[in-house]
Amino acid sequence: QQQVKQSPQSLIVQKGGISIINCAYENTAFDYFPWYQQFPGKGPALLIAIRPDVSEKKEGRFTISFNKSAKQFSLHIMDSQPGDSATYFCAALTGGSYIPTFGRGTSLIVHP
Amino acid sequence: NAGVTQTPKFQVLKTGQSMTLQCAQDMNHEYMSWYRQDPGMGLRLIHYSVGAGITDQGEVPNGYNVSRSTTEDFPLRLLSAAPSQTSVYFCASSRQGSREQYFGPGTRLTVT
């Protein structure tokens, strides 16, 4: 049973466009929602994270939108660049836990 | 700091062979984990440890053993390799009280 459902599995965007990746969860005990970015041949690395007491968090071109009532959160990449081409994982953690539950990942390709 | 290091980077095994994937971290993190990454399946937790001498099973532990004799090292042992264990393996660590996981560069394992 997938606790965190991520879509789409793959995404192709033109340079300068907006990339949007969506995640949904069922467990209302989740209280921390990170996104990890993984470049080819590398390990994932934390990109940005949000807690459910805020609806949006922005860091540069990357924004997390959070909808607590719908149990959904999404990553928006504004002005997408070829260097953003990577696999993105959403994740969720319950209070006191340090082990994330990961989504299955989205492979993003940004064409020049 | 080197962060999380993994050796080897690549490995080819024959069915039935055994081997140990090495993982070390120099950040004095209490928590360490092993994941496998397969296409379309995301990151699946194999085993994890909350400190030296303490380990527990994750989502997909069958065919793998771990031990944690020191804070720094967390080796993953394949007892009798099977083609289904062909995957990319990531080790991760995190500090007690932190929700961020630091991943190693991965080991790509092929079992023929």
Image (tube, coloured by chain):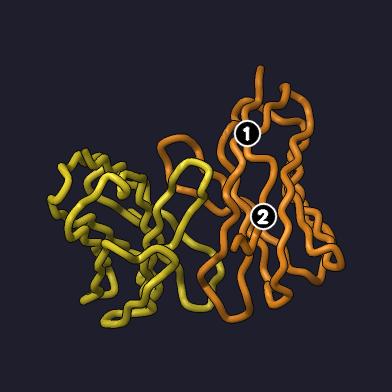
Chain colours: A orange, B yellow
Chain letter of mark 1 equals A
Q: Is residue B37 left or right of residue B69?
A: right
Q: Is residue A28 above or below residue B80?
A: below
Residue positioned 59% across, 63% down in the render: A1
Q: Which picture quadrant has residue A65?
A: bottom right
Which disc, if any, is residue A5? 2
Label 1 CA crowd tier, 10 Å (few <14, some 14–19, many 20+): many
x and y percentages locating residue A18 in the rendered image: 78, 33
> In this view of the protein, which residue sits in the foreground, A54 or A9?
A9
Residue positioned 42% across, 55% down in the render: B103
The first of marks 2 and 1 along the sequence is 2
Which disc, if any, is residue A108? 1
Task: Tell me how far mark 2 sits from mark 1, CA to CA.
Answer: 17 Å
> In this view of the protein, which residue sits in the foreground, A76 or A104?
A104
Q: Which amino acid does the dot numbered 2 rest on?
A: Lys
Q: Seen from this angle, which residue lies furthest left? A: B17
Q: Which amino acid does the dot numbered 1 rest on?
A: Leu
Q: So how many labels did they put on this image?
A: 2
x and y percentages locating residue A53 in the rendered image: 81, 71
Q: Of helix, strand and loop, which one carries label 2? A: strand
Callout 2–callout 1 Cβ contact below 8 Å: no
x and y percentages locating residue B57 in the rendered image: 37, 73
